[in-house]
């Protein structure tokens, strides 16, 4: 990979990356701040896309069309959906879906985008392997999982909804951007991976846990990305 786009939804998720860029340049497009230069000898473009799917999709397309990135990494936090996945653990995407697409009234299963060849966007295996290796160098009593990231325009804070995302959609973690980034990467035939550290468990205590752990989880994910860049 020669030019890697790195997307975080929120300031907490990208600030530690922007400050690491050497020979840093800057350009504003569509109200978004794109910072480019070198991290660990790799040329990167780092951007805070804003929360939820439309912001993430728009930002990904700009990274590809305007900045010419040839790979996309999404870093950030997520809600954990499985018993063994604890706060500050990491999920590396094997694939991603947009679970809130629902044309079931027309006969398509929930989470399926009508007339698109696939609604399951497969992450790049070299990027997955690299992220998994990076975890070994930054782990601190936490665990790392490879699994499906499920994305929707909703902060999930409900046990019932959490169960649906796990049982019906096969999710390991839920968040609000990864599936949209994956979708745009797929349409452009650009490799991607999503790295998410767990800030909460997407249950009735999610709002409180999120506030407490979002900073730490964002840092965990950022550290993985930096370590990954030094080996890519
Ligand atoms: N990001 C972090 N926690 C989340 C949750 N519970 N739902 C959606 N996005 C999240």
Image (tube, rainbow, N blue to C red):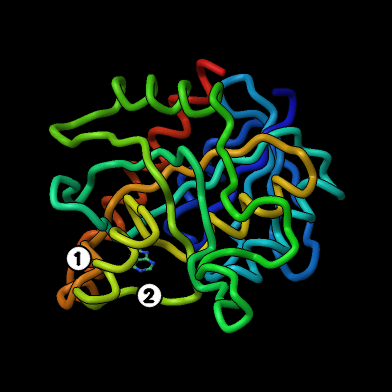
Distance (Cα) linking label 2 and label 1: 16 Å
For label 1, the SS is helix
Q: Which residue is mark 1?
A: 212
Report if the CB atoms under discs 2 and 1 are less than 8 Å apart.
no
**Residue 190, relative to residue 203: is it above or below?**
above
Nearer-the-camera pick, 21 or 190: 190
- Earlier in the chain: of badge 2 and badge 1, it is 2
Residue 209 locus on image (x, y percent): 18, 67
Q: Quadrant of residue 124?
A: top right
Number of residues whose C-alpha sits closer than 10 Å to that of mark 1, classed few (under 14), some (14–19) or many (20 or more): few
Identify the residue at horizontal 45%, vertical 54% (top origin). Answer: 13
Residue 62 locus on image (x, y percent): 79, 55
Q: Quadrant of residue 45?
A: top right
Nearer-the-camera pick, 59 or 212: 59
Number of residues whose C-alpha sits closer than 10 Å to that of mark 2, classed few (under 14), some (14–19) or many (20 or more): some
Within 8 Å: ligand 1 and the Cβ of disc 2?
yes
Q: Quadrant of ligand 1?
A: bottom left
Asked if residue 172 lies left or right of residue 191, the reply is: left
């Amino acid at each position: 990979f020669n030019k890697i786009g790195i997307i975080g939804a929120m300031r907490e998720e990208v600030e530690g990356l922007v400050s690491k860029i050497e020979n840093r340049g800057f350009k504003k497009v569509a109200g978004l701040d794109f910072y480019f230069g070198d991290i660990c000898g790799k040329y990167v473009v780092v951007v805070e896309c804003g929360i939820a799917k439309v912001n993430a999709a728009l930002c990904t397309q700009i990274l590809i069309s305007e900045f010419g990135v040839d790979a996309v990494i999404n870093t950030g936090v997520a809600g954990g959906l499985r018993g063994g996945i604890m706060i500050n653990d990491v999920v590396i995407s094997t694939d991603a879906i947009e679970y809130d697409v629902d044309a079931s009234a027309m006969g398509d299963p929930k989470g399926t985008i009508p007339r698109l060849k696939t609604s399951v966007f497969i992450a790049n295996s070299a990027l997955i392997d690299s992220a998994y290796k990076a975890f070994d160098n930054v782990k601190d009593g936490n665990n790392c999982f490879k699994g499906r990231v499920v994305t929707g325009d909703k902060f999930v804070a409900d046990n019932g909804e959490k169960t649906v995302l796990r049982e019906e959609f096969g999710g390991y973690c839920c968040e609000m951007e990864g599936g949209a980034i994956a979708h745009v990467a797929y349409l452009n035939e650009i490799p991607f991976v999503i790295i998410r550290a767990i800030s909460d468990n997407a249950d009735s205590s999610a709002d409180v846990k999120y506030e407490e752990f979002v900073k730490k989880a964002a840092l965990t994910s950022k550290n993985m990305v930096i370590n990954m860049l030094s080996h890519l």
